[in-house]
Amino acid sequence: MLLSRLVWENKQRLFYQMRHDGLRRRQKPFPTAADMHYPEIDMAIRRLKPFWMGQVQSGDRLVQFISMQDQLATLTDCAADYFDFYLTHRTKFLRKLRVGVDHMLLRGRGVIKCTVDPFNGYQLVFEAVDPLFIIMPDSAIDFDDADGFVHCRQMTVPQYKRNRRYNQDQAALRRIVGSVNFENYSTLLQDKRIREGITHNRNPNAILLWEHYTKTMGGWTVNTYCPYNPDVEVRQPFGVPYKVDGKVSLPFFSFAMEVKDEGWYAPRGLGELLAPVEQYLTKLWNEKADAMTFGNRPVFTAEGEIGNTANIRWQPGEFIPRNIKAVQMSPLPFSFDQELMFARSIGEEQSQSPDFGITNSAQQQQGTKPRTATENQRISALQQAGTNDNGNFFREDLGRLYKHAWGLICQYRDRDFAYYAAGKLGVLPAEALHDKYLIAPDGSPDGWNRMARFQKSVARLQLWKGDPNCDQDKLKRDVMAADDAQFAQKAFIPSNLKAASESEDEAMEIVILEQGFPAAVLPGEDHVSRIMVDVGWLAKQGMTGSPMDPVAKQRVFQHLMMHFQYLKQQQPQVAKQILLKIKALEQTPRTAGAPAPGNTNSIQNAPPQGTPGAPTGQPFNPSL
């Protein structure tokens, strides 16, 4: 396996160097020549990383749960809220996933390992594993279909000692620490077999271990040993103990940047895609700097010999002997700036991320028009279609990781199930803790673009507002979530709960009005629910024939008129429907001598807010 992956491994080491340090010029044309690094790979990774993390954090929660057994929807919501809270606040999941996404963008594949720590209450532990430290056979496509693979683990001596599952014998420990003598190996073997961090470690304070996973009929068996002293027993062989849906679940999950041909080493990262572009851009940048050096410090000639050039001072007003002249260089056959923009456009196509820096004045200097806003928008939309497609299979791999993590929570229940969501504390009910859920990342592939998502949600609300065939609560909640998912969880109140709360509050206001105190009418209140409470109270008084204080009746009726005027301004069609309901109530039989609930004409013809004679929020004064 080591020899088969040698070409891939050498390329990955080169791409890492190109991203961070760049490749130095092999031979400078003169001692002070430029030796710069154009960071095209790093810039592309920094542009694309928010998109991939947006696939994780664009929804109300990290995950959405769908129960596959009959249970209350509140239990499913509790399970999703707890899982979201646990991954976000009790583990380093998001931090490790960012590292895994960075590995994926650079190398083409990222790896996340999810295990439990039995010495810390079976808490979930997430690790971002550099694919460079996974030794996988060529025949494997992913972890699940491999016959076996090796995870190369590097740790310090104190980290090794803190893990009670490893052999703590001092004699064994001295044999597996780094700084091993490899003088007996030939140069050929060193080139092929000995690679720092993979087969050996020269750090005397570090330990290199191989966890060799082998597929068996019953699952997976793990053998742990040191590669340069495999006879030292570091840990007893053990089977993978994690189970999901009753089956053994391997704790490794990979995320491929692209789907191409089959094979573990098939996906390409931005390092491989943009390496030629970065090399060319670096060459252009260096040679442009060299040309500027020659232009600012030209070569001089003279008609005769100059005795001592050290005596010549290049300052304004100085005397230059012997008719010295600067050598005139021929003009360049092309523009460096134009060529730089051409190379950057190729990198833009390869990385599928818009490079808006291309719209620089360099294009105008060459007589070409810069990109317009419409052109940039169309390029961005086309490239977004490609990245959204990549986001779909990234979310599939993420869903498998979520399923594994939830399975471990169900398997190892020795933990605190309290959580905080939507501004409230809660405890996960025992009946909600099972593995009969469909688990998928929340949100959508294009949810990373918050502004576009918000605009789409607002447009949808305006188009379907008031339509009885469309769930109005869902429309409004989507707008709130597009602005801020946490705000939506805290602030959104379903219509049925809001109407009940408003009705209860209006009933309390009627009691206040009866006692002669003012009750203000606010524009943002649910006027429909409050009007119906007021009309119902008046109708009840009429039907029962109970004695009614005429002053209290006038206060309540005045309060009702204010609600109706606000409703008439905000929702004219709904106001007409309310009038019809009030007319129906007026036809209701009443006890002899009982007052009518209200006069529809007086309500309909009441002056608008702010005009003379319009109802106000002041209490009724009988002296007026």
Image (spheres, grey):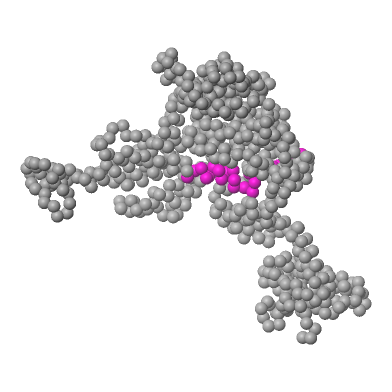
Please state the horizontal and vertical placement of residue 476, each as a whole percent of the image: 66, 57
The outermost residue toward the bottom is 623
Does 132 sit above or below residue 185? below
305 on left or right of 86: left
| Residue 508 position in % (x across, y down) | 80, 67
Residue 540 as seen in the image, left or right of residue 524 = right
Stretch of the chain drawn in magenta: 47-69
Residue 448: % across, % down: 56, 47
Identify the image quadrant of the C terminus. bottom right
Label count reads 0
Question: Please, which residue is most extreme toward the front here?
Answer: 170
- Residue under the image location 59 percent in, 45 percent down: 57
Q: Residue at x 47, y 23 (%)?
A: 202
Depth check: give the residue in front, 211 or 442: 211
Q: Quadrant of residue 221?
A: top right
In this rendering, does residue 128 appear at all? yes
For residue 52, which quarter of the picture?
top right
User: Does the segment drawn in magenta span residue 56?
Assistant: yes
Q: Residue at x 44, y 43 (%)?
A: 43
Q: Quadrant of residue 88?
A: top right
Q: Residue furthest left?
A: 304
Looking at the image, residue 541 lies above or below residue 119: below
In this view of the protein, can residue 201 be seen by the observer?
Answer: no
Question: Compared with residue 397, is residue 369 higher up or lower down, i.e. above or below?
Answer: below
